[in-house]
Amino acid sequence: MQCASFTPPMPLPIRVQLLSLCRDVLAPLLAVDGGVLYVVVLDDTSLVLHLGGTCAGCPGAPITTSQVIEPAVRSVSPSVKLSVTSGGILPPGAVPATEFSL
């Protein structure tokens, strides 16, 4: 009797994992309090996010960034360059994370 060989699945590209994190975890967390997570740039080496909605101008935005967003992103990719902005004016190219596509 022969045993079937097992080939482990290929890991998803970092950008796909980061987008899933933004769409499925971070955006819903922010939405609970009326915040909106925008993706400005997303590739395998950098992630630029913008916090809008009630996060714009909120004094808690830096805490959200340092205590929630940064650790979550680092768990997916410790080396990705992360930049998070907030405010009422959207940066060029910003798309809600729930609508962003690769």
Image: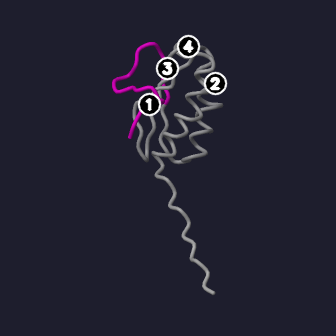
Q: Which residue is mark 1?
A: 39
Tell me the kind of residue under disc 1.
Val
90 within the magenta span: yes
Tag 4 and tag 1, C-beta contact below 8 Å: no
Q: Which residues are magenta?
A: 84-102
Q: Amino acid at mark 2?
A: Ile
Q: Are marks 1 and 3 in contact (CB under 8 Å)?
A: no
Q: Earlier in the sequence, mark 2 or mark 3?
A: 2
Task: Judge whether 21 appears above or below 7 on screen.
Answer: above
Q: What residue does disc 4 label? A: 54
Q: Secondary structure at mark 1?
A: strand
| Crowd class of label 1 (few under 14; some 14 to 19; many from 20; radius 10 Å) | many
| Mark positioned earlier in the residue sequence (4 or 3) | 4
Other residues around mark 2 within 10 Å, as few (<14) / some (14–19) / many (≥20): few
Task: Classify mark 2: helix, strand or loop.
Answer: helix
Marks 4/3 in contact by CB < 8 Å: the verdict is: no
